[in-house]
Image: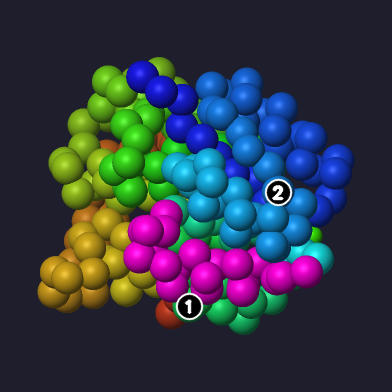
Amino acid sequence: MAKPTILIVEDEAPLLTLLRYNLEKQGFRVEEATDGQEALLRVAESRPDLVLLDWMLPSLSGIEVCRQIRRKPATRDLPVIMVTARTEDQDAVRALDIGADDYITKPFVVDALLARIRALLRRSGTVAIKGTLSFLDLAMDQDAHRVTRAGRALHLGPTEYRLLEFFLSHPGRVFSREQLLDAVWGRDIHVEPRTVDVHIRRLRRAVNAEGEADIIRTVRSAGYALDLEDS
Ligand code: CA
């Protein structure tokens, strides 16, 4: 099977080197661009499977690059992960509004980025790529469709599996019921937000054994996160 190609658009040389090293180690082919104009050229020429796009770039901002990628029919569905150094939620929302599929804030943990890249490639269906997602003592083997906590096998329904897979791709991040509905059930399906609570309860029952810490955090009036209650 051909290696998936990731285009890294990044003007900070040390970060570019670090990302290239880690992505190649994970079996990806890497193309790079160091400014916005070059990014658009590379997208057209090397037809990447996913673009990792820095927000602040010389010549053309990441936002503008993303807009242009979305505007062209040939690249309309190209998966884009926006990399932002800003911590304001406002900017992250803007990245999603202009069509980025996901975003990650600098500084980030490389493993978290890799998990998101895999999740997005899988979701886009262009590349069949699987791996292992983990959080604390919880592990999900996506090839075998097996989930364990502290070595014990967990039995999850299909919806709980997808919910957990989504949480594992974004550990620590809080999602509203609506965001979870969009990501796990799909945008075109009408489901009551309360349905999310039902599946979260089932997921909790499945992952937390007697005496174990609850790793699904309820955030009052905001939603849920894969996180420890007191962290
Ligand atoms: Ca930059």
Front-most of residues 77 and 180: 77
Residue 145 in sight from this viewpoint: yes
Three-letter code, disc 1: Asp
- Main structural element of the magenta stretch: helix, strand or loop? helix
Q: Is residue 201 above or below residue 119?
A: below
Badge 2 residue CB within 8 Å of ligand 1:
no
Badge 1 residue CB within 8 Å of ligand 1:
no
Front-most of residues 173 and 29: 29
Q: Which residue is mark 1?
A: 97
Q: Secondary structure at mark 2?
A: strand
Question: Does 106 lie within the magenta span?
Answer: no
Front-most of residues 206 and 175: 175
Residue 108 in sight from this viewpoint: no
Q: Residues within 10 Å of mark 1 (few under 14, many from 20)?
A: few
Mark 1–mark 2 Cα distance, whole angstroms, equals 23 Å
Toward the left, the furthest residue is: 190
Q: Earlier in the sequence, mark 1 or mark 2?
A: 2
Q: Residue at x 76, y 52 (%)?
A: 34
Q: Which residue is mark 2?
A: 33
Q: Residue at x 59, y 44 (%)?
A: 7
